[in-house]
Amino acid sequence: MKKYFQFDELGTNYSREILGGFTTFLAMAYILVVNPLTLTLADVTDLPEALRMDYGAVFVATAVSAAVGCFVMGLLAKYPLGLAPGLGLNAFFAYTVVLVNGSPWQHALAAVFISGVFFLLLTLTGLREKLINAIPMELKLAVGAGIGLFIAFIGFKNAGLIVSNEATMVGIGNLHDPEVLLAIFGIIVTVILMVRGIKGGVFYGMIITAIVGMIFGLVDLPEKVVSAPPSISPTFGALFSAFSDPEFYTLSMLSVILTFLFVDFFDNAGTLMAVANQAGFVKDNRLPRAGKALISDSIATIVGSIFGTSTVTSYVESSSGVAAGARTGFASIVTGVLFLLALFFSPVLSVITNAVTAPALIVVGILMVAALGQIAWERFEVAVPAFLTMIMMPLTSSIATGIAVGFIFYPLTMIVKGRAKDVNPIMYLFALIFLIYLITL
């Protein structure tokens, strides 16, 4: 084992790898609560049950897909990166594809499955890296920041801090509501933990908020701590029913598949490079075994869609495990084992409310928006598509729309600036596809 993971060459040992893997799990564990709540649209009232996924099944799918991703990453790529269903992509799945478009969740899972297959094929052929390189860095950064704003907005809404207002569209919520006050407490606690550099601060913030909520009767006490995992039958294999439904084969669903592809391109590649660079794996601006690392999220996404969850991607929270000493894929395997063990603690996690998870969404949104600092805002031809990409996501409640608008404006502003030759031909193709998509909405 030590020889396979090159412990001696990388100057690590079992204790460091176990601590690193455990630290990464703690930093990512919030997804076990946030993902089921998001995909089941728990904060949406009067939703037809046909559009709402089963919470317990999504919980199992979340843990299993995360474990699969971690195992493949650890054994194949040998990097200390944790994977799980991505925030932002799950919001797009639930709030845009299902809630706004009205598509059955089975169709959304089928779109995730197809994108996962494409991920795998593109990675094996090397085209995935070429497509990523064709998209300008400014738009990649804007996509990440826009998703961060969208996630944070959902967090504020779920917390009751932002509510609809007929005069101004949105306004401040009722600050005297106990649920809102609990969410505010959670935000403050989580921010303090993050500022102090506490590893797993988001997870601990949720735990502390939940305990305080239980003390004041705002969060139900779990009936038990350990139980058998919930049934996976409500979602397992449900995606395959979409392939026999003629309504699945639409241009709108094609745009959904492309959005899953694009967003995961940026998210996974950026996270992979950031964490790998922190760990000292990047040599001469190249990452050894990059192809194997990209395969892990492809396989996990395919498995996850079959079990019943949205796209799986690498987590930037893995940097906390690296900071704790993780240097090999053994740490990823530890993280994966912990996700499987979490399956037996669903009673504890199932009582978590929106007031408890909202701070996690807001803080993760803050972390993602940090990418804005790397955009050259002084170049107006770049600032326009970057800004529109970012701002249109929360304003339209659609990640796809934000990407579409930004990708259309980028070639346009570059042509007007006299820099048409600087635009990769693939970007013109993207612009045409998204223009057709917007016209047919």
Image (cartoon, grey):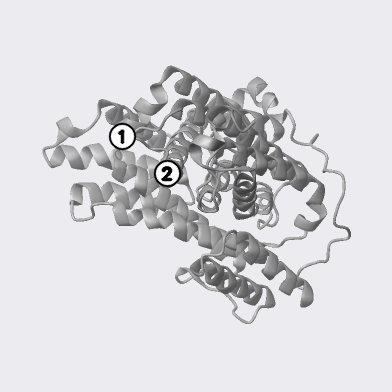
Q: Is 56 on the left-hand or right-hand side of 148? A: right
Q: Residue at x 32, y 39 (%)?
A: 407
Residue 383 place in picture, x, y as percent: 25, 51
Q: Residue at x 64, y 33 (%)?
A: 71
- Front label number (1 vs 2): 1
- Crowding at dot 1, Cα within 10 Å, few <14 / some 14-19 / many 20+, comes out as few
Q: Is 402 on the left-hand or right-hand side of 202? A: left
Q: Residue at x 51, y 65 (%)?
A: 197
Q: Amino acid at mark 1?
A: Asp
Which numbered circle lies on residue 332? none
Determine the image quadrant of residue 248: top right
Residue under numbered circle 2: 401
Residue under numbered circle 1: 284
Residue 208 place in picture, x, y as percent: 68, 69
Q: Amino acid at mark 2?
A: Thr
Q: Is 286 on the left-hand or right-hand side of 268? A: left
Quick one: which residue is furthest to the left in this view?
418
Q: Sequence-wise, which precedes: disc 1 or disc 2?
A: 1
Determine the image quadrant of residue 138: top left
Q: Residue at x 51, y 53 (%)?
A: 323
Name the secondary structure under disc 1: loop
Name the secondary structure under disc 2: helix
For the N terminus, the quadrant is top right
Residue nearest the viewer, comparing 312 with 6: 6
